[in-house]
C-alpha cells in the first residue's frame, strides 16, 4: 500500500471504480463495524434520540440550562444563530471540496503531510494510525495549522481555488471567536466565571482539518473514521448534507443528521472533560461511510499549548492533572480507541 514512502490515498482507490472489494487494511473487525443490517435499522426506528440544538441568539440565562443538559448528556450539540455568516461556511465547504475533486492526484500529493510525523500539516490519509496493525480509516484529509498566527503559514496551503487561503484564514478567525464564546457560556453554565475554561486552556492552538470520505464499495465493513474523542478542548464541525457522523450515547451510535447549511456542530473534547472534572463529558464519535456519495466535513480543533498543564477546576479532583504534550503523545502512541486516554487519567 505504500507508494515511494507515501501512503496511498483512499480517493485513488476508488477512482475509475477500480476497487469493488475493500482492501483488507480497511476492513474493521466485526465488533467495530457499523451496523448496516436491517435488524438494527428496525430497532433504531422505534427510538431515535436527536442531538440538541442550541440557539445562540437567545439570552445567556436561557441558554445556560439547555447547554448544561447537552454537555452532560451528549458532550455534543448543534448551534444555530451563532453569528458566523452561512456564506463563509459554504465557501469553506466549496474550496475544501474543490481541492479534493478538481485537482489531480499529483497536484494533491505535492501538498502531502509528513507521513512519519503525527498531525503534520498537509494532505494525508492516516491521522489516527498508531501502529502497523491499526485498521485504516476510509478517509483522506487536509490539515491546516491556523493558530496561533505564528503557526499559520498560508503560503503552504493550496490555491487551486483562487480564494482558498483567504477563506481558510477568515474561517479560522471566525471559529476562534465562536470557540471562545462557547467556552465562556459553558463555564457560566457550571457557575464558573465566563473566562474560567478559556484561561485554563490558554491561547488556542487551532487546526482545521478538511475531511474527505470517498464513496466506499463495502460501507458495512469500514469506518470513515474510527471511534475516538477529540483530544483538545472544543471542536467545531461543519459538514455537507451527505451525513456520516455518529455520536455514542448510552452505548448506542446515534447518527448526527446534517441540520442545515448554517448550523455548526460542537464536540466537547477531552481537556474540557478534565477541567469540568467530568461534569461535562467529551463526546465519543466516529464517521461511517456510504456506497454512493463522497462526504465532506471540516473539523476545527481548539487545543491547549503543549506546555500547558490541565487540571480540574473542581474539588475533589476526579482526574489527574496532565501536561498536554504528554496527553498528545500517549494519544498518538496508543491510538484513540474510544475514550481510553481520558479514562486512563481517572483517579
Ligand atoms: O467527519 C466527521 O464528521 C468527523 C471528523 C472528526 O471527528 C475528526 O476529524 O476528529
Ligand atoms: Fe473527532
Image: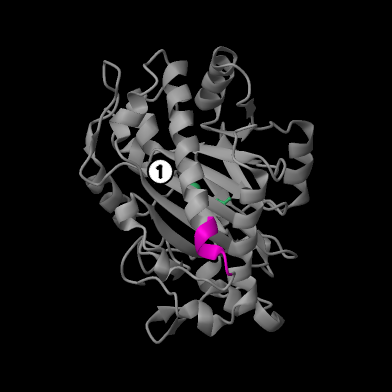
Q: Which residue is mark 1?
A: 302
Q: Is mark 1 within 8 Å of ligand 1?
A: no
Residue 293 can be seen, yes or no:
yes
Please determine whether, in this image, residue 19 is positioned above or below residue 83.
Answer: below
Image-quadrant location for residue 41: top right
Is 176 displayed left or right of 22 in the figure? left
Q: Nearer the viewer, residue 67 or 83?
A: 83
Q: Closest to the observer: 173 or 69?
A: 173
Using the rendered image of the protein, determine whether residue 253 is visible from the camera's viewpoint. Answer: no
User: What percent of the width, then of the height, locates residue 296?
Assistant: 63, 58
In reply to whether residue 27 is colored magenta, the answer given is: no
Q: Please report the bounds of the magenta region as a residue range.
A: 162-167
| Of the pair 201 and 230, the residue shown nearer to us | 201
On the rendered image, what quadrant is the C terminus found in?
Answer: top left
Residue 172 at x, y percent in the picture: 47, 49
Q: Main secondary structure of the magenta part?
A: helix
* Rendered view: 263 above or below 131: above
Amino acid at each position: 500500500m505504500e507508494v515511494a514512502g507515501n501512503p496511498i490515498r483512499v480517493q485513488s482507490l476508488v477512482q475509475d471504480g477500480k476497487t469493488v472489494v475493500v482492501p483488507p487494511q480497511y476492513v474493521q473487525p466485526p465488533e467495530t463495524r457499523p451496523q448496516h443490517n436491517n435488524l438494527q435499522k428496525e430497532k433504531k426506528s422505534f427510538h431515535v434520540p436527536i442531538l440538541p440544538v442550541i440557539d445562540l441568539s437567545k439570552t445567556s440565562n436561557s441558554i445556560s440550562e439547555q447547554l448544561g443538559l447537552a454537555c452532560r448528556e451528549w458532550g455534543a450539540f448543534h448551534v444555530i444563530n451563532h453569528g458566523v455568516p452561512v456564506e463563509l461556511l459554504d465557501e469553506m465547504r466549496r474550496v475544501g471540496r474543490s481541492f479534493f475533486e478538481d485537482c489531480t492526484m499529483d497536484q494533491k500529493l505535492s501538498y502531502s503531510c509528513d507521513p512519519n510525523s503525527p498531525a503534520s500539516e498537509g494532505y494525508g490519509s492516516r491521522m489516527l494510525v498508531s501502529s502497523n496493525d491499526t485498521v485504516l480509516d476510509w478517509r483522506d484529509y487536509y490539515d491546516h495549522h491556523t493558530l496561533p498566527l505564528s503557526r499559520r503559514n498560508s503560503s503552504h496551503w493550496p490555491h487551486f481555488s483562487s480564494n482558498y487561503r483567504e477563506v481558510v484564514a477568515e474561517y479560522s478567525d471566525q471559529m476562534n471567536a465562536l470557540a471562545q464564546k462557547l467556552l465562556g457560556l459553558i463555564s457560566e453554565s457550571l457557575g464558573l466565571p465566563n473566562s474560567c475554561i478559556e484561561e485554563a486552556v490558554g491561547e488556542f492552538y487551532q487546526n482545521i482539518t478538511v475531511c474527505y470520505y470517498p464513496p466506499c464499495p463495502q460501507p458495512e465493513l469500514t469506518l470513515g473514521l474510527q471511534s475516538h474523542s477529540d483530544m483538545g478542548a472544543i471542536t467545531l464541525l461543519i459538514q455537507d448534507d451527505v451525513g456520516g457522523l455518529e455520536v455514542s450515547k448510552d452505548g448506542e451510535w446515534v447518527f448526527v443528521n446534517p441540520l442545515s447549511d448554517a448550523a455548526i456542530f460542537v464536540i466537547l473534547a477531552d481537556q474540557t472533560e478534565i477541567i469540568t472534572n467530568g461534569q461535562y463529558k467529551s463526546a465519543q464519535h466516529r464517521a461511517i461511510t456510504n456506497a454512493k456519495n463522497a462526504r465532506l466535513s471540516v473539523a476545527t480543533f481548539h487545543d491547549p499549548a503543549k506546555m500547558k498543564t490541565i487540571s480540574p477546576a473542581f474539588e475533589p479532583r476526579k482526574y489527574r492533572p496532565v501536561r498536554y504534550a504528554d496527553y498528545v503523545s500517549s494519544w498518538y502512541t496508543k491510538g484513540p480507541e474510544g475514550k481510553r486516554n481520558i479514562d486512563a487519567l481517572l483517579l
